[in-house]
Structure formats: C-alpha cells, structure tokens
C-alpha cells in the first residue's frame, strides 16, 4: 500500500455530522479517506462490492450508521479488512440501538466499535491499525499522546492556580 487509506462509509448522508469528526484526525496522521454513502438495506450490492474490493486498498473501513446499524456487520462479513463501527445517535433510543447492533456481532465476524458519535476515536483506531506495520505512524501516535498529556498537565496547573486564589 503506497499510501495509507481508509474507507469511511455512512449509512445515510444525515450521518455526515458525526463522520466529519474523523476527517481532521485522519488528516493529522496522513491517512487518505474515501467517503461513501451506502446502505446495508437499500444498497446491499454496493456495500458488498466495496467490502470485497477493500483488501489491498484500505487499512481499515470506518462504518458510521444509526438505527439498526447493520452496515458495519455487513461490511465485515465480506472482507478481512478491519471494520470500525461508529454508532450514530438517532431516534427514540438515542443511539443505544445502533451501539448494540454494531457491537453485538457473532463470533468470527468482529466489528471494532467506538462510542456513540465517536468518529474521532475511530480515526485514531485506524491509525493504530496502520501503525502495526509502520514505525512512522507509531511515532505520530506517540507524539499525539504526548500532546494529550501536556494538555492535561496545563489544564491541571491552570485549575490549581485558579483554586488557590
């Protein structure tokens, strides 16, 4: 794979508000992204085609879907490329239905699942998948984690100063 690339597949265009949280993270780590709108129920053939063509093209597939959220599972059933599910909050159950549909996969067909609306974490997980075979990506992830730690230390120091007044 000359460049690192993931597919980000949404079940509906209305999922874009959640999906776009992954874009700056993927950019930060230098991971290209093909974005698609495909439905497990309304365009199952297109979902199957993308999944079957994924090997050798994508390091991971990020699946963003709400309600029944079968998209991640259908993608995973047709490829060996890791699928990362991002449940979307919608409807009466506020995303719990999507979370359960995404995480409760049968043995042998896993979908790694992040929090409801957790597209940024899905992008980080995709970078971690890439990092398994890429030392440069591991260094980018270490630098990112160091930045997170420094931010917490600054917040801690600022809070302690404010509370002393």
Image (spheres, helix red, strand yellow):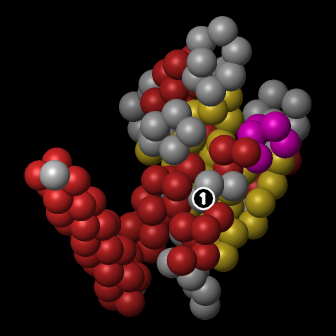
Residue 114 location in percent, x, y? 45, 42
User: Residue sitting at 59 percent across and 12 percent down?
Assistant: 93
Q: Is residue 128 left or right of residue 71?
A: left
- With respect to residue 151, does 110 lie above or below? above
Asked if residue 47 lies in the magenta stretch, the reply is no
Asked if residue 13 lies in the magenta stretch, the reply is yes
Look at the image and tell me whether residue 33 can be seen.
yes
Q: Is residue 31 left or right of residue 41?
A: left
**Residue range (magenta):** 10-16
User: Residue sitting at 56 percent across and 39 percent down?
Assistant: 117
Residue 13 location in percent, x, y? 84, 42
From the viewer's side, name the closer residue of 79 and 161: 161
From the viewer's side, name the closer residue of 84 and 122: 122
Label 1 belongs to which residue?
Answer: 22
Q: Secondary structure at mark 1?
A: loop
Residue 27 location in percent, x, y? 60, 76
Look at the image and tell me whether residue 156 can be seen.
no
- With respect to residue 137, does 5 lie above or below? above
Q: Is residue 160 left or right of residue 105?
A: left
User: Residue sitting at 61 percent across and 68 percent down?
Assistant: 24
Q: Is residue 164 left or right of residue 10?
A: left
Quadrant containing the N terminus is: bottom right
Residue located farthest toward the front when viewing the structure as drawn? 165
């Amino acid at each position: 794979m000359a460049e690192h690339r993931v597919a980000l597949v949404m079940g509906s265009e209305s999922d874009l508000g959640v999906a776009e949280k992954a874009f700056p993270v993927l950019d930060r780590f230098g991971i290209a992204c093909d974005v698609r709108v495909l439905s497990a129920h309304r365009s199952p053939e297109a979902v199957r085609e993308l999944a079957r063509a994924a090997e050798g093209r994508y390091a991971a597939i990020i699946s963003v879907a709400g309600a029944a959220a079968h998209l991640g599972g259908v993608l995973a059933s047709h490829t060996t490329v890791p699928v990362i599910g991002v449940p979307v909050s919608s409807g009466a159950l506020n995303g719990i239905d999507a979370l359960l549909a995404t995480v409760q996969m049968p043995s042998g067909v896993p979908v790694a699942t992040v929090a409801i609306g957790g597209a940024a974490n899905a992008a980080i997980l995709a970078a971690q998948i890439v990092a398994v075979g890429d030392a440069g990506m591991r260094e980018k992830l270490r630098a990112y984690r160091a930045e997170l730690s420094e931010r917490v230390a600054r917040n801690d120091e600022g809070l302690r100063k404010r509370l002393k007044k």
